[in-house]
Amino acid sequence: MFDELLKMQVPTVSVIVTCYNYGLYLEGCLDSILNQTFTDYEIIVINDGSTDNTDDIVKKFQHIKNIKYVKQLNGGQAKAKNTGIKYALGRFVAFLDADDEWEKDKLEKQMVLFLREAVGVVYSQCCHIDQRGMLRSNLIITEKYLIPRSGKVTNYLFLDNFVPFSSSVVRKACLQRCGGFDESLQMGIDWDLWLRISTIYEFDFVNEPLLKYRVGHMGQMSKNIELRHQCADRIMTRFLNLYPNFISPYFIRKAYSFTYYNRGEYYRFFDKKKAILYFLKSIVNNFREINSYKGLIKILFPFIDR
């Protein structure tokens, strides 16, 4: 009897919502959780030092028993998410940034994939919404390295992060075994975590856009490309040092070639010397990276690109 009572008190999923000055979107975010067809969850809202109306929005939900509200001084997204993990009681942890929303059957469709103990992370496809919550487009994946994958995914994950963060549900044992988010990183914290988890656990996904990812508004860290490059270098270098021989030399070369190609494309429009350097580094790592040759041609013969 006591065991059954204890089981009823502990939720299966802890949904961690981190918020820094996203009060404008927080209500829609929380409503999308409360409208889930899967109902065995708790919600943990982490206010990471917001100076907007986040407190007022949360007060609207204070009558709901399974919502925890934690306030802390601004410490960055990694620290906020780690705080949420500390408060999480569930055997699974779902992450949802305060400016994003879920489809109502998201958790229901994902949780069944955890019946296999080998699976540590389940994610889904996503669609884009604008500042008003209006659908902009389904995310059509054209980049081959962003194609969703399941099973042992480390090699492909090292090429690029194909897991939409706010779509992710993680077995809590993964976090206990592999550690949480690296608070010294400003960007790419999810990619760093997924790589570590992928060395032990399998990944799976629902091939539907169950996440509504908001784009085009102020405050998105993903706009800081230079910082993203620096963090990506740290993540890749450290992973290879911590897990030597885990990724095949073939995939390492492909990953760096693809990384340098993307940087060449970024700099091509305002720093041609740097762009040429990155395109050449891309080719050195993988002479079959055709796009890097095309990038060089566009710089050296700009009339062709017209």
Image (tube, grey):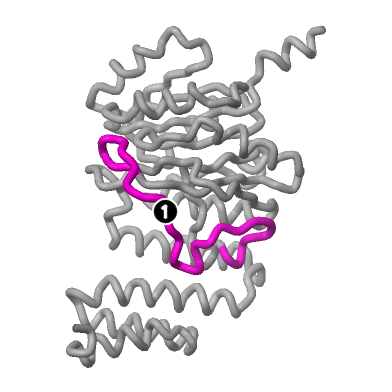
Q: Is residue 48 left or right of residue 178?
A: left
Furthest toward the bottom, the residue is 301
Q: Is residue 19 left or right of residue 108?
A: left
Question: Residue 154 location in percent, x, y?
Answer: 61, 62
In this rendering, the count of numbered labels is 1
Question: Residue 191 location in percent, x, y?
Answer: 49, 54
Q: Is residue 274 left or right of residue 89?
A: left
Quadrant position of residue 108:
top right
Question: Residue placed at 76% from the left, 44% from the top?
Answer: 116
Question: Residue placed at 40% from the left, 13% from the top?
Answer: 61
Amino acid at dot 1: Leu
Q: Which quadrant: the N terminus?
A: top right
Question: Residue placed at 53% from the left, 15% from the top?
Answer: 66
Question: Residue 178 location in percent, x, y?
Answer: 62, 47
Q: Main secondary structure of the magenta part?
A: loop
Q: Residues within 10 Å of mark 1 (few under 14, many from 20)?
A: few
Reply yes or no: does residue 245 show up in magenta.
no
Q: Is residue 295 above or below residue 22?
A: below
**Residue linked to disc 1:** 139
The residue nearer to you, when weighing 17 against 274, is 17
Looking at the rendered structure, the secondary structure element under dot 1 is loop
Tell me the magenta residue range.
129-156
Q: Which quadrant: the C terminus?
A: bottom left
Furthest toward the right, the residue is 1
Question: Residue placed at 31% from the left, 77% from the top?
Answer: 264
Q: Is residue 178 above or below residue 10?
A: below
Question: Residue 77 location in percent, x, y?
Answer: 39, 40
Q: Is residue 67 above or below residue 272?
A: above
Q: Is residue 96 left or right of residue 2?
A: left
The residue nearer to you, when weighing 93 against 183, is 93
